[in-house]
Image (cartoon, rainbow, N blue to C red):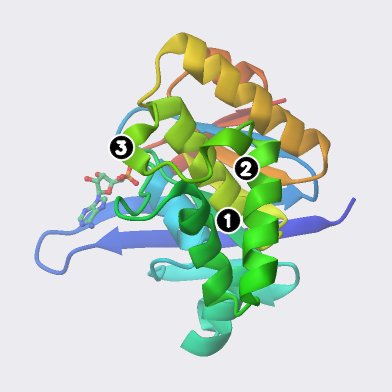
């Protein structure tokens, strides 16, 4: 299998006066179809790493090659396209738009990718079915449980058929039963070929993956497969 992601010397230093080194020269290769857990104590750099891979922030140094393209040197327009078509991200706090229905929350990411209205609606319906929420298409986020909201967020991350799915503590706000149920959906996505990198505090969740990468003070402390 080929490497979908190659990270070299990735460094992120926040601040100008007071400097925080969130990532200190990380090297990492991820193969297509892998399921990776990113663990480590709060503040070790998990979110920073995911945000950089997602192109949501710029590194201080180093490169991030996704599918052969170094996203750290791309002009904004091209970065936006890659962000839209190759990467799906699921945040800890769901980040759904409260005034939109489950279906509309998914459609909006396809709107950005300029899919037609019909295609958006058809695909949103299909995705809601995949995450077991076919009957909740017209519910607003506050009418859904935490686990259901997170499944909508997963469906949204899948909308543009991205192969690389990033998840930042997706079970962090769910009880253990809901968390197990969510993981079933996540594992299934992986079995269907999605490459997944998931930050998690939960050892049970990490156990389900192919490789656990443990960060400490912005460095890779150890990797277990
Ligand atoms: N926007 C920011 N400005 C300054 N420091 C930050 C910022 N975001 C994160 N940090 C710092 O970077 C380090 C790594 O944070 P983070 O990536 O959020 O870790 P984790 O997700 O593992 O808890 C921490 O020391 C944190 O305080
Ligand atoms: Mg974090």
Q: Where in the figure is residue 209, as x and y percent of width and height?
A: 68, 26
Instruction: Using the numbered discs, state the Cα–Cα distance from disc 1 to disc 2 in whole angstroms.
Output: 16 Å
119 above or below 152? below
Q: Earlier in the sequence, mark 1 or mark 2?
A: 1
> Which-is-in-front pick, marks 1 and 3?
3
Res. 87 in view: yes
Q: Which residue is mark 1?
A: 88
Q: Residue furthest right?
A: 1
Q: Residue at x 48, y 68 (%)?
A: 55
Q: Residues within 10 Å of mark 2 (few under 14, many from 20)?
A: many
Instruction: Using the numbered discs, state the Cα–Cα distance from disc 1 to disc 3 in whole angstroms.
Output: 23 Å
Q: Residues within 10 Å of mark 1 (few under 14, many from 20)?
A: many
Q: Which residue is mark 3?
A: 142
In this rendered view, identify the residue nearer to me: 73 or 95.
Answer: 95
Q: Earlier in the sequence, mark 1 or mark 3?
A: 1
The secondary element bearing badge 2 is classed as helix
Q: Where in the figure is residue 40, as x and y percent of width and height?
A: 42, 29
């Amino acid at each position: 299998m080929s490497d979908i992601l190659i990270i070299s010397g990735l460094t992120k230093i926040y601040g100008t006066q007071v400097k925080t080194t969130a990532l200190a020269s990380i090297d990492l290769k991820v193969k297509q179809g892998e399921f990776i857990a990113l663990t480590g104590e709060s503040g070790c750099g998990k979110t920073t790493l995911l945000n950089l891979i997602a192109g949501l922030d710029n590194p201080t140094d180093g490169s991030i090659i996704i599918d052969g393209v170094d996203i750290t040197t791309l002009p904004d327009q091209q970065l936006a396209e890659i962000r839209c078509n190759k990467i799906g991200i699921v945040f800890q706090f769901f980040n759904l738009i409260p005034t939109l229905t489950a279906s509309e929350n998914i459609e909006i990411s396809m709107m950005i990718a300029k899919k037609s209205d019909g295609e958006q609606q058809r695909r949103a319906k299909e995705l809601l079915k995949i995450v077991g929420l076919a009957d909740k298409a017209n519910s607003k986020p506050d009418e859904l449980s935490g686990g259901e909201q997170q499944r909508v967020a997963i469906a949204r991350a899948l909308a543009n058929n991205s192969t690389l799915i990033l998840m930042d503590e997706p079970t962090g706000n769910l009880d253990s039963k809901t968390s197990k149920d969510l993981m079933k959906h996540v594992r299934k996505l992986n079995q269907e070929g999605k490459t997944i990198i998931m930050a998690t505090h939960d050892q049970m969740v990490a156990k389900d993956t192919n490789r656990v990468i443990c960060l400490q003070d912005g460095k890779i402390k150890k990797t277990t497969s």
